[in-house]
Amino acid sequence: MKKLAIVKGITPFAIALSSFTFTSQAVAEPTPAPTSDSIKSPQEQYKIDKEIYIAALKLRNQQIRAINIVFKNTCDKAAQDFKIAMSSARTPDQKNLANALRKNAMQR
């Protein structure tokens, strides 16, 4: 009981003391004046960002198409070369070599 009475007596004093010691002073710092370039509504900024994103997507799709075309042409050429090599191959070593060349061409 004595401890509780001591705590009850010290608590208001501690709160009052802490409010005086931790007060901060407000300092007003000037904000920079906005320039004409930086004044854009969120909708305008969204439209600009969307156009940039769509342009990047179109470029990415063109690059992917080019890569796929090159890969398809390489695979078609490898398949054609494999057919020619297999038609003239007589030994298992020649057949294995033709198969290895085809797989190697498709992995690049």
Image (cartoon, rainbow, N blue to C red):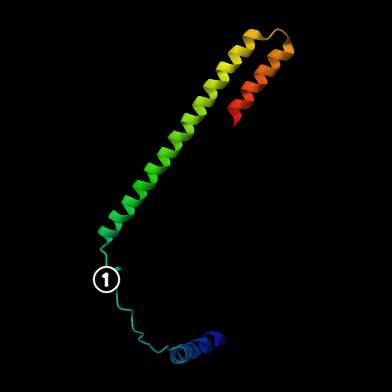
Q: Which residue is mark 1?
A: 36
Residue 103 falls in which quadrant of the image?
A: top right
Vertical position of residue 56 compared to residue 34: above or below: above
Q: Residue at x 59, y 17 (%)?
A: 81
Residue shown at the point (43%, 34%) measured from the top left:
65
Quadrant housing the C terminus: top right
| Front residue (pair 9, 53) | 53
Considering only vertical position in the picture, is 39 above or below 97? Answer: below
Query: For mark 1, does the 10 Å Cα neighbourhood hold few (<14), some (14 to 19), or many (20 or more) residues?
Result: few
Specify whether 63 is left or right of 40. Answer: right
Left/right of residue 62 with respect to residue 34 in the rendered view = right
Residue at x 44%, y 91% (from the top left corner): 16
Instruction: Give the number of marks.
Output: 1
Q: Residue at x 65, y 22 (%)?
A: 101
Q: Considering depth in this image, is 50 or 12 the residue closer to the camera?
A: 50
Type of amino acid under label 1: Ser
Which quadrant holds the N terminus? bottom right
Residue 80 at x, y percent in the picture: 55, 16
Residue 39, image quadrant = bottom left
Q: Give the percent coordinates (x, y) of residue 25.
A: 40, 89
Q: Secondary structure at mark 1?
A: loop
* Relative to 88, 69 lies left or right: left
24, 77: nearer the viewer: 77
| Residue 56, placed above or below residue 43 | above
**Residue 51's spot in the image, x, y percent?**
31, 50
The one nearer the camera, 15 or 11, is 15
